[in-house]
Amino acid sequence: MKTLAIIGAGKGLGLSIAKSFGKRGFQVALIARNAAKLQDMVEELKADGIEASYFVADIFNKEQIEQAMTNMKEKYGQIDVLEFSPTAGNYPPTSVLELTAENARDAFEANVVSAIHVVNTVLPDMLARKEGALLFTSGLSAMYPVSMMGNIGIALSGLRNYVTNLHTSLSAQGIFVGHRSLGLLIKESGTGAINDPDVIAEMWYQAYVEKTVWEEEYPKGVTPETILF
C-alpha cells in the first residue's frame, strides 16, 4: 500500500486530497500543528475506510518536522507521495507598500524554508528507489506579481523557483514534481464547482497519475484579473 503525506493538512483541501488518494488505496499521514483538528480528520477518513494517522509539527520548527517525518516513516515504511500546502504564516497578506522585513521573512520561512526541510526528509529515499512524487499547492502570486500579496508573493515566487529547480533536477530520476498555482478562493466541498476542494483534489490525483503537466495555474488560464472569489 502506498503512502501519501500531507504537510499543512487542513479540513478543506488537505482533507479532500486525503480522500481522493485514500479511496484509490493510499494510506494517509497528516502533518499540522493542531492535534484536535488532525484527530477529527483521521476519524473522518477512517469512517470512509481509509487508513490514516496524524503527526503534530509546527511548520516553522525544523526539529519538529524532522521528528514527525521520522515517526511517519517508522509507521508506514516510506513516503510515496508528498503534498505540501502549508499555512501562509503568522501575518495576513500585506500590500507591497506596507511590507516589512518581519512579515516577508515569516512568509518565506513558512513556505520556502519549511518546504526545504520537508523535502530533505523524503528525497534520499525517493532517489534510492527512483520513484515518488512531490506535489506543491500554492497561490497565484507564485506566478504573477500581485501588489496586495506583497509578503506572500515573495514567499510563493521563491517556492516556485525551488520547485522548478526540483523538477529540472528530478524529472530524469523517476520523481514527479508537480506545482499547481490556485487562482481562486476555495469554497465548501460538495458543490462540484471548480473551487470545490473535492474537485481540486481530483485534479491533483489525475496530475499525479498522468505525470504529463508538471506546472499549471488552476483553473487553467486564470490571471490576477480573473481570480475566482
Image (tube, rainbow, N blue to C red):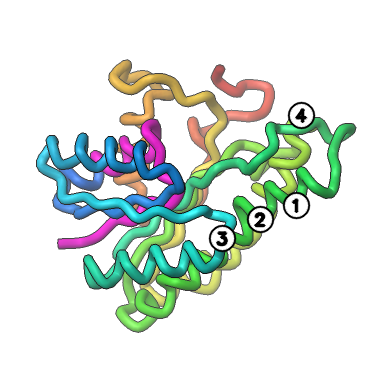
Q: Amino acid at mark 4?
A: Met
Give the residues drawn in magenta, as a range.
Answer: 1-20
Q: Which residue is mark 2?
A: 109
Q: Determine whether 180 is above or below 190 in the image.
A: below
Q: Which residue is mark 1?
A: 105
Please provide percent x and percent y for residue 79: 31, 66
Q: Which residue is mark 3?
A: 61
Q: How far is disc 1 from disc 3 in space, using C-alphas? A: 14 Å
Which is nearer the eye, 183 or 172?
Answer: 183
In the picture, the quarter occupied by the C terminus is top right
Please provide percent x and percent y for residue 157: 68, 50
Please provide percent x and percent y for residue 202: 30, 37
Lateral position of residue 26 relative to residue 80, left or right: left
Q: Determine whether 101 is above or below 66 in the image.
A: above
Q: Nearer the viewer, mark 4 or mark 3?
A: 3
Q: Secondary structure at mark 2?
A: helix
Q: Determine whether 143 is above or below 188 in the image.
A: below
At x 85%, y 43%, the residue is 100
Which is nearer the eye, 220 or 109?
Answer: 109
Q: Which of the two discs, 4 and 3, labels the residue nearer the N terminus? A: 3
Q: Secondary structure at mark 1?
A: helix
Q: How far is disc 4 from disc 1 in space, using C-alphas? A: 16 Å
Which is nearer the eye, 75 or 165?
Answer: 75
At x 60%, y 23%, the residue is 227
At x 84%, y 39%, the residue is 99
Q: Which of the two discs, 4 and 2, labels the residue nearer the N terminus? A: 2
Q: Amino acid at mark 1?
A: Arg
Q: Secondary structure at mark 3?
A: loop
Residue 160 visible: no
The crowding category of the residue bearing disc 3, from other C-alpha atoms within 10 Å (few below 14, some 14 to 19, many at least 20), is some
